[in-house]
Image: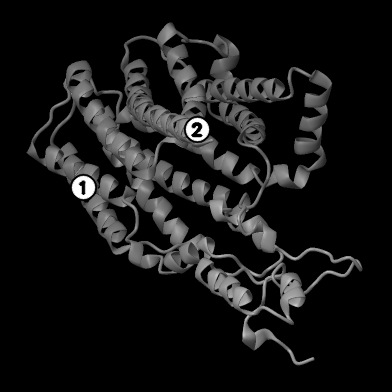
């Protein structure tokens, strides 16, 4: 018995150590994926929008990304239903059509996300990739402010300081951009238009994220169903924007006009990148996500120097450094002093409650099995004794010693009583 128990403990330790190694590797994989997705999307959009020749319609690219996203989510739902088409169709009808009120809630964030996706193309087409990457971090500021106003969330002092540093860093970068432009031909680019587009995009991103969190709090729908609902509105609103902005040109040249292999890569990155990050983020904590965002700014800046002849001077370095530091500071966990209830909750979880529902709330420990014999059971008459009070080990030993001392006339009665846990003296009522 002892050898088997020791072998089982060794196997459990080995399994735990192996799982921790896997989680550690997944964290590093998550970091690489987050950095690659953040940097590659912006650099690739900037690249295809600055190439000479006929350009593709950005409004059609937004619609195509939504179509691919919806198709991917539908395929995942079908996979979850084990390729049962009938069950999948009925499930989607119930989630999207019959629960139409729940679906309509997503029309507002979908409208904002569609506007944001179009504005990103406008901003990146008119701003250097590195400048856009730095300025776009203002979405952290807008999200924090909307969270405070709409969700009544509280921010730590470190987070407020990081937001001030973030704003200062972005402001320094904008001052630097007044005197420095990319070496390429910028005659078709308007820096002010790009700046306004990225600011509106940050505002819409912050509001949409907080609104999305507020209306869906407590919802049981899966992330794939939510993406289908968002995608349906996104396709409809995207087609409306395409008709409004590029309708005659699309009718003349076609929906896929100007689509090259690189453009398709951008669309696939935009469609699947967000879904991939949503899966990967499961293994990444806030510090890792903040570090990934900061590192992607560095990658975008370095690649912009080689791809777009971007000029980096002292002002840009100082501003980008402030933004990187602010992003990392904001992602740091709050001080433990803010959660004063945690010690008491931890201590309560190690003790056993008299509440009937405590077994479904509190975690079970190894000692619970040893105390199982002291739980109340029905006697021969079918009557359940009063609720048992669990006795700690020292009290239990003292009680057993007392029972051993009480011999003689009360021996038979003592044998019966010893099978039932005794309540504290102050809980005994006179007979």
Query: Of the residues under marks 1 and 2, which one precedes in the sequence?
Result: 2
Q: Name the residue under label 1.
A: 169
Helix, strand or loop at label 1? It is helix
- Alpha-carbon distance for marks 1 and 2? 55 Å
Q: Position of residue 331 (x, y in %)?
A: 33, 48
Classify 234 as above or below 427: above
Q: Position of residue 421 (x, y in %)?
A: 67, 71
Relative to 133, 280 lies left or right: right
Relative to 381, 137 lies left or right: left
Q: Position of residue 85 (x, y in %)?
A: 80, 19
Q: Which color scheme did the rendering employ for the protein?
A: one colour
Helix, strand or loop at label 2? It is helix
Question: Residue at position x 22%, y 21% from top?
Answer: 303
Question: Residue at position x 47%, y 62% from top?
Answer: 346
| Residue 341 at least partly seen | yes
**Residue ranking furthest to the top:** 261
**Residue ranking furthest to the front:** 408
Where is residue 178, by image quadrant?
top left
Mark linked to residue 8: 2
């Amino acid at each position: 018995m002892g050898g088997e128990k020791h072998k089982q403990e060794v196997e459990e330790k080995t399994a735990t150590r192996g799982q921790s190694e896997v989680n550690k590797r997944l964290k590093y994989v998550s970091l690489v994926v987050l950095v690659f997705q953040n940097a590659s999307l912006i650099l690739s959009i900037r690249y295809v929008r600055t190439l000479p020749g006929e350009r593709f319609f950005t409004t059609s690219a937004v619609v195509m990304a939504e179509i691919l996203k919806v198709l991917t989510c539908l395929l995942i739902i079908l996979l979850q239903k084990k390729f049962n088409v009938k069950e999948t169709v009925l499930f989607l009808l119930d989630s999207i059509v019959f629960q139409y009120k729940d679906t309509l809630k997503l029309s507002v964030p979908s409208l904002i996300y569609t506007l944001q996706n179009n504005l990103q193309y406008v901003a990146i087409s008119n701003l250097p990739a590195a400048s856009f990457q730095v300025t776009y971090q203002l979405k952290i500021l807008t999200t924090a402010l909307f969270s405070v106003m709409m969700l009544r969330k509280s921010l730590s002092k470190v987070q407020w300081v990081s937001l001030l540093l973030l704003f200062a860093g972005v402001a320094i970068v904008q001052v630097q951009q007044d005197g420095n432009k990319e070496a390429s031909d910028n005659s078709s680019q308007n820096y002010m238009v790009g700046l306004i587009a990225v600011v509106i995009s940050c505002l819409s991103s912050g509001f949409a994220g907080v609104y999305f969190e507020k209306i869906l709090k407590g919802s049981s729908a899966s992330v794939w169903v939510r993406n289908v609902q968002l995608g349906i509105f996104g396709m409809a609103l995207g087609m409306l924007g395409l008709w409004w902005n590029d309708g005659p040109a699309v009718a003349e040249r076609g929906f896929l006009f100007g689509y090259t292999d690189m453009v398709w890569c951008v669309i696939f990155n935009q469609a699947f990148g967000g879904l991939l990050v949503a899966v990967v983020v499961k293994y990444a904590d806030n510090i890792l996500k903040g570090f990934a965002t900061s590192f992607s700014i560095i990658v975008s800046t370095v690649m912009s120097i080689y791809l777009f002849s971007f000029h980096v001077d002292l002002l840009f370095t100082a501003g980008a450094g402030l933004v990187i530091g602010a992003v990392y500071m904001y992602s740091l966990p709050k001080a433990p002093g803010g959660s004063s209830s945690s010690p008491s909750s931890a201590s309560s979880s190690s003790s056993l409650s008299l509440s009937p529902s405590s077994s479904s709330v509190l975690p079970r420990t190894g000692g619970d099995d040893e105390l199982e014999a002291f739980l109340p059971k029905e006697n021969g008459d079918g009557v359940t004794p009063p609720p048992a009070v669990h006795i700690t080990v020292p009290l239990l030993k003292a009680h057993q010693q007392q029972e051993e001392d009480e011999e003689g006339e009360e021996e038979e009665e003592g044998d019966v009583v010893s099978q039932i846990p005794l309540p504290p003296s102050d809980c005994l009522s006179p007979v």
